[in-house]
Amino acid sequence: MTLTSVATSSARLLDQFGLSAIAQAGDWPVRSPIDGSLLARLRTHTVDEADAAIARAQQAFAVWRNVPAPRRGELVRLFGEVLREEKAALGELVSLEAGKIRSEGLGEVQEMIDICDFAVGLSRQLHGLTIASERPGHRMMEQWHPLGVVGVISAFNFPVAVWAWNAALALVCGDPVVWKPSEKTPLTALACQALFARALQRFGADAPAGLSELLIGGASLGERLVDDPRVALVSATGSTRMGRAVGPRVAQRFGRVLLELGGNNAVIVAPTADLDLAVRGIAFAAVGTCGQRCTSTRRLIVHESVREALVARLKQAYAGLPVGDPLAEGTLVGPLVDGAAFEAMQAALRAAAAEGGTVTGGERLLADAHPDAFYVRPALVEMPAQTATVRHETFAPILYVLTYRDFDAAIALQNDVPQGLSSAIFTNDLREAEAFLAASGSDCGIANVNIGTSGAEIGGAFGGEKETGGGRESGSDAWKNYMRRATNTVNHSRSLPLAQGVRFDI
Ligand code: NAD
């Protein structure tokens, strides 16, 4: 895609979302990773405006928590309907702003639609337990109540889906949302707000103002959400460095935190693995989104008996990967997000080589055509050991290859990194598969058999352990993060027995 067509496409889409004026309102530059061209100049929010947004959300909470949950679900259903209508446009804007290939941009919007559907069903299932009481004529139960304002801080690489995972659940749970998107992807956030406003219009008058607020700007605005006691839950997605700053600050004020941080995901390939599946699964997970998914495969732990065959096939696949314009038909690998990402990738490759690694690929491509964009050939690095560089998450398409002989050593290597997000094994040996999934197997929040590490569905709880932050969002019972639990005991007898046989007669 040429510079003019990026500009033309973005102008068309911004107009479609009603954002043309906002896109020229300030001096905060938004650039496309496709060619580095300027997409917009936004006005950033001030600290006072952030405070006012949180105040509006807090007022909205007082109203929204009393709207019946299935009615709240109706708003999310309408939002899902708007997203279906605008899937193509929003997906394309994701590609322009984040550099994802078209099918991944569309896939991200589909993920938003999926979580809306999930949340609508959930709006009739926010149920607690009934618990047997030890006292006669008593009943115990749990109720789940709305929690309060949810602050969402999101990363550039899933510019819209992560907000939707949080917002769809928060809204059915009775919580307003204040969103601080990545400074690299504010346009898609503005588009989401415009689409949500459309859903609100269709919904009617019982939705209060302030249900969905947006803060455009840098990390300092995120810090307002972190430090403000009116924000009951801070759901923060990004680097471990960010989480290390955010977690203790929210804990300091006894707020609730949901952290979705960096990963360093491995695939084990065992002697019985179906290598056709393994090659496809590894390639998609290692080079998809140009290696910029939290779940991207970064380490390959392959049995010595299949190493040569697998690495040869991966090298062949890597050499033929179509790298380029993410919106062009057939492209599988788009650009890195910016020059800093490129520098970080080159620094990691130099460090790995100094540690004894053999690097294939990793060079810059299309620099003449796009001097302000950063396209690379994904890199495969054969390592003698799991060195410091391998144990660090570099957010770029680098796949480190390690070899194992003994299955237990493979598990030990897989777990011997600070992060604990996603993991996978390719094997046809039932014992190995089950051992990998067992308590003494993978220590990650996600562990897969015969599929790669990325591309999770919204039905499961998503998140990871250790430096990944421990949070779980999206499916399963992740909704409980967005609600507070009340334990109730009701006495319907005519006496007042005390628990544990305690006597207190007056
Ligand atoms: P980043 O940490 O640079 O920024 C993420 C967000 O945090 C941005 O909105 C930023 O403004 C904000 N921020 C940064 N410092 C902050 C602070 N001190 N207080 C409040 N807010 C702050 O991350 P990025 O480069 O946008 O994204 C890439 C990283 O995100 C990778 O490490 C990736 O693994 C991780 N990620 C994790 C998940 C997951 O679900 N586990 C999903 C996507 C991305």
Image (cartoon, helix red, strand yellow):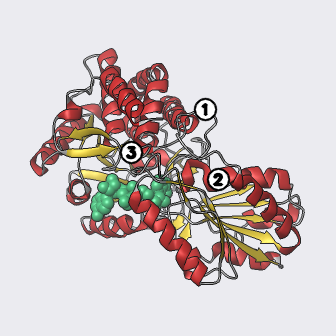
Of marks 3 and 2, which one's residue comes earlier in the chain? 2
Looking at the image, is mark 1 or mark 2 earlier in the sequence? 2
In the image, 150 versus 293, the foreground residue is 293
- Where does residue 370 sit, x and y in percent of width and height? 44, 47
- Is residue 487 visible to the viewer in this orientation of the structure? no
Viewer-nearest of labels 3 and 2?
A: 2
The one of 10 and 485 positioned closer to us in this rendering:
10
Which element carries disc 1, helix, strand or loop? loop
Determine whether 459 is above or below 315 in the image.
above
- Name the secondary structure under disc 2: helix
Mark 2 CB lies closer than 8 A to ligand 1: no
Residue at image location 47% in from the left, 50% down from the top: 368
Q: CB atoms at circles 1 and 2 under 8 Å apart?
A: no
Q: Residue at x 39, y 45 (%)?
A: 494
Depth order, front residue of 13/121: 13
Q: Label 3, on which residue?
A: 494
For mark 1, what is the residue? 329
Amino acid type at image mark 3: Arg
The residue located at (39%, 46%) in the rendering is 482
Residue 329 pos. (x, y %):
61, 32
Q: Secondary structure under badge 3?
A: loop
Circle 1 crowding by C-alpha within 10 Å: few under 14, some 14–19, many from 20: few
Are the residues tagged 3 and 1 within 8 Å (C-beta)? no
Point out the image quarter for the C terminus.
Answer: bottom left
Query: What residue sits right under mark 2 in the picture?
Result: 285
- From the viewer's perspective, is the residue at label 3 or at label 1 nearer? 1
In the picture provided, is 401 more to the left or to the right than 242?
A: right
Tell me the crowding category of disc 2: few under 14, some 14 to 19, or many 20 or more residues within 10 angstroms, Cα based: many
Ligand 1 is found in the corner quadrant, namely bottom left
Expressed as whole percent of the image width and height from the top left, the position of residue 97 reads 40, 41
Count of picture labels: 3
Q: Amino acid at mark 1?
A: Glu
